[in-house]
Image: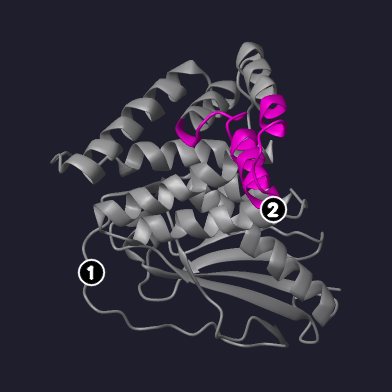
Amino acid sequence: MPISDAEAYHFSVRFRLPTHQCIYSEDGLVSLDGIAGEDRLELRPTDTTVLKDARYLVLSGFGYVDEAAAAAAYKQAQKALTLAVLESSCGIELFRDNFDVWRGVMAIGRVGAEGYAVGVTGVGADMFRARLTRWLADDRDLTDDQSICINLLMDYHFDLNIRSRSLLAHAVIERLCNTPIEKDAPYLEAIDSLREAAKRLAIDPTMRKLLKSDLDKLRFIGQTERIRRTIAQKLGDDRATQYSAAANMRHKIAHHGLKAGDISWTFCSIASDLLFDSLN
């Protein structure tokens, strides 16, 4: 179906960037190859005329044969957009209360915006186009854990509270490093001996069951060490060392009132690396 056909279906994914981030380009439009062959995609601002000044933007797809095809492309584009944004160390807030899929010709509306700070971090349009194009070609479905982690990292970029940012980023790390790891063999042998001894104790069944449960928990290393080992395995020893230092600082801040700088970015960068490692 020709793209210009008024009977074609189209979609739009509307979103906003944090006030301190931008997609840097003096242009007002980024064009991309489509998802289905004869379609085309466009990224443009809706609150200004050039991308570098925009906080409100829309990613639109044009030229789908029916509503189902447009809806599928919408879903794929939304996933690719969020991953390209996170890969660029940015965040977005998606708007889902607009006309996401439509038929025929419809103007892309502009929105007004109040004053905002000039973006101080961001990504160049060419780099963003390359990342978005690569993720558009990846048709894998996200797992529930990956989707949750993406949403947490998106929230990270909009939260200006240091403590909240640390909690959001660390929640991603915890979710992506949640596979239990058993302690060393000699320790496990000692636990097994204690379990056998517990069978001979003259205690009621409820207490015996509780004791068995507690001993089973002792078979596994604690959360911080589990995360450190998982990071070392997936990202390398240097990243594990960075996590250990940040985790130690987090503990001192939370429990000893230590005044320190923002360690949330360390957690965020490690969380992002773990997320994209899970997508490889």
Q: Which element type, helix, strand or loop, lies under badge 2? A: helix
Magenta range is: 195-224
Q: Provide residue 140's location: percent of width, then percent of height.
A: 77, 51
Q: Is residue 222 left or right of residue 248?
A: right
Q: Quadrant of the C terminus?
A: top right
- Based on the picture, tell me whether residue 197 belongs to the magenta stretch: yes
Question: Residue at image x 59%, y 39%?
Answer: 214
Label of residue 243 in the image? none
Question: Residue at image x 55%, y 85%?
Answer: 97
Q: Amino acid at mark 1?
A: Tyr
Magenta stretch, overall SS: helix
Per the image, the residue denoted by label 2 is: 136
Rendered position, 220 above or below 59:
above
Q: Is residue 4 left or right of residue 30?
A: right
- Based on the picture, tell me whether residue 232 belongs to the magenta stretch: no
Q: Provide residue 178's location: percent of width, then percent of height.
A: 60, 40
Q: Quadrant of the N terminus?
A: bottom right
